[in-house]
Image (cartoon, rainbow, N blue to C red):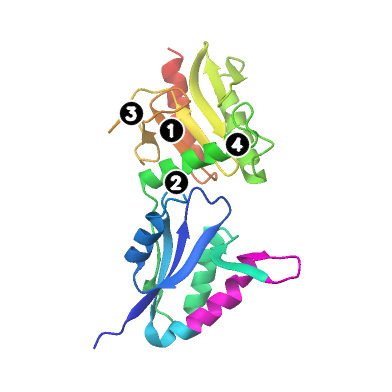
Amino acid sequence: MAKTKSVLYILTNPCLDGWIKIGITDDLAGRLQSLNNKTAIPLSYRVYATLKIESERLKMAEQIVHSYFDQYRAKEINEHGKVLRNREFFSITPEDAYAYLEEIRKFAQIDKTALEKHRESKTDKEAELIAEEAREISGRNTAGGDIDFASDNIRGLYEQFRNKILELGNKGITEEPQKHYIAFKTYKKNFVDIKIHKNSLVLFFNVKSGELPDERGLTRDLEAERHIGHHGNGDYDLRITDDKEFDYIMKLIKFSFEQNSK
């Protein structure tokens, strides 16, 4: 007889900035449908990671989950110290939560194949971008986003790209802050625009659909399947959070620079 399995899940939602949802269920699809049918939140939950747990290890896993995550749990406490609400929402990054799931898997002696990180779809990325823009518009939003509002990592990443971009054309490149992005121009033509978010940069390449030589498929063609509205110039964008592909991305920027310098 097959052993029954429950699923420990991490859910994210673009509307819940800084929060994730963690829980255990026997029916993940049904749980998602229930959450996403509610009208209290405009964008859907999506699965970030799951850990399948056999029934005999479930109690141990639940105890470990509580010990690991309770410090991050959303709690509403009144002036007398009484907990009014104790929810399955946690103020922790999904990356850190996933690392905890790996520790739980090892401690509970669960096979490594039971832990899975789910890939983010293009639709998920679009929703996250829309939500991040909305958060900044409702808060602070100056030219190109707000470099002061960005995390230390993103400020450093922007400066890294800025310095290399300005080196492309010696003194022939200008940097011009606009309302929604920072434009880098050659001969008065934008070749790359950068929008600064708190936890990411979005680059817009001023290249026509189908013409950017992106062999690795990192960028998104904004005209390929349907028109996707955006603030920057050109038909390609790329959202980045680190410098892992820095040299390759600079090659794409250089291509756009050369195309717009003709």
User: Which of the two labelled residues, at mark 1 and mark 4, occupies the earlier sequence position?
Assistant: 4
Image quadrant where residue 36 sits: bottom left
Residue 227's disc number:
3
Please give the range of residues in magenta: 60-82
Q: Under tag 1, what secondary structure?
A: strand
Depth check, mark 3 against mark 1: the one in front is 3
Depth check, mark 4 against mark 3: the one in front is 4
Q: Residue at x 64, y 28 (%)?
A: 142
In space, the residues marked 2 and 3 are separated at their CA atoms by: 22 Å
Q: Under tag 4, what secondary structure?
A: helix
Whether residue 92 is situated above or below residue 212 in the rendered picture: below
Task: Quickly name the residue at label 4.
Answer: 138
User: Which of the two labelled residues, at mark 2 and mark 1, occupies the earlier sequence position?
Assistant: 2
Q: Residue at x 36, y 67 (%)?
A: 28
Task: Quickly name the residue at label 1.
Answer: 237
In space, the residues marked 2 and 4 are separated at their CA atoms by: 16 Å
Image quadrant where residue 48 sits: bottom left
Q: Are marks 2 and 1 in contact (CB under 8 Å)?
A: no
Depth check, mark 1 against mark 4: the one in front is 4
Task: Return the x and y of residue 208 as percentages of the image width and height.
Answer: 35, 22
Q: Residue at x 41, y 18 (%)?
A: 259
Q: Is residue 63 magenta?
A: yes
Task: Return the x and y of residue 25 as percentages of the image width and height.
Answer: 40, 72
Kind of residue sitting beneath label 4: Ser
In space, the residues marked 4 and 3 are separated at their CA atoms by: 26 Å
Task: Quickly name the residue at label 2.
Answer: 42
Whether residue 219 is situated above or below residue 24 in the rendered picture: above
